[in-house]
Amino acid sequence: MSDIEISVVIPCLNEEENVQGIYEEVRAELEKHARSWEIIFIDNGSTDRTRELMRALCAADTHVRAIFNTRNFGQMRSPTHAIYQAEGAAVVGMCADFQDPPQLLGEFIRQWRDGRMIVLGVRRTEEKAGALLTAARKAGYGFLARNADYAVIPGATGFGLYDRRVVDTLARWHEPEPFFRGMLVESGFSIGLVPYDRPERRGGQTKNDVFALLDFAVSGLAGSSKALLRRPIVWSFGFMALGLVLAICAIAAALAGGTAWPWVILASQFALFGFGFLFTGLLGEQVRIIAERTRRVPLVIEQERLNFPTDRTMPVRQPFVVAEDA
């Protein structure tokens, strides 16, 4: 096993205004609370000075490691890949923009040492979060609570600490589009919660516009709710049952000497709707099964990695690919 106690993973995309500062604050907290540690930055295709600053940090501090992706692989795949490359007995995932306060690291570590396998920061409030965004989040959490395959934690963004066993377990799943905060809950490991008020981004511009948030929400819903794929099958039985009732009404009307053809038409329409939803549901179920059997896509392709020990034996679960021109 590794002699590193705590790994902190920080994904970046054009964070030149925050890289140095987040490193300094995270290091200060780790020196107070961790017996041994490493900080892993993963850059997801920055076009500013982010990589230059990461190189300088790696040159100055052997505790700092960096991964440079060949392109932007999205806000789900890149952070998760870096988490799987961490070697610590526990791994912390957090953002570079200071909206995930480094000051919570001590409490995360304390709860982990007390036996919690997962410790998550839970957002109570967020500075400058508009009413529309707040309402959308509330509606989204409510929808997930009713439809997800497992309980969701409102306000949990994935910022937190995960035990080594948790990380290795999730890495074996080979999720091609990992909704990591959902996977943590799905794993069933014990979870501790740390409420906090989320501050405003300290520097730079947010990369999460409305389209990025929508894409994240759709991917999260698709990854956490297989039940939705089966919903058309349930609806199909309802339509066919209604069609059967209408068919009985048509027979009754005919026997009574009334007009039966409107009932026949309605019964036929609902029967067709029922069969249509049935086949749609079965098709969705087949897609789900295929997805379950073919999850072997690398999360990212690395262009370069810095300061990783050449004799590192962990992790061995999630493969990474290095570009040929790296």
Image (spheres, grey):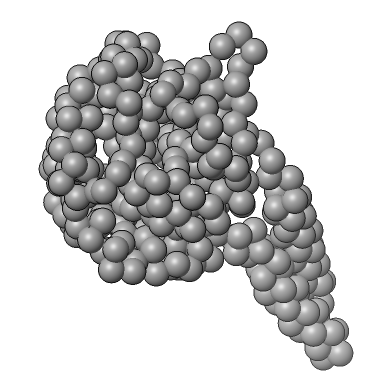
The answer to whether residue 215 shows anywhere in this view is no
The answer to whether residue 114 shows anywhere in this view is yes
194 w.r.t. 297: above or below: below
Q: In the picture provided, is 213 more to the left or to the right than 312?
A: left
Q: In the picture provided, is 295 more to the left or to the right than 143?
A: right
* Residue most extreme to the top: 325
Q: Residue at x 38, y 52 (%)?
A: 90
Q: Residue at x 81, y 88 (%)?
A: 252
Q: Residue at x 33, y 47 (%)?
A: 6
Nearer-the-camera pick, 97 or 7: 7
Q: Residue at x 33, y 53 (%)?
A: 161
Locate residue 180, reporting x and y percent. Answer: 46, 49
Nearer-the-camera pick, 250 or 153: 153
137 w.r.t. 44: above or below: below
Q: Image quadrant for the C terminus? A: top right
Q: In the picture provided, is 299 more to the left or to the right than 107?
A: right
Locate residue 133, reporting x and y percent. Answer: 26, 45
Q: In the picture provided, is 31 more to the left or to the right than 230?
A: left
* Residue most extreme to the bottom: 256
Locate residue 285, reporting x and y percent. Answer: 73, 58
Nearer-the-camera pick, 268 or 254: 268
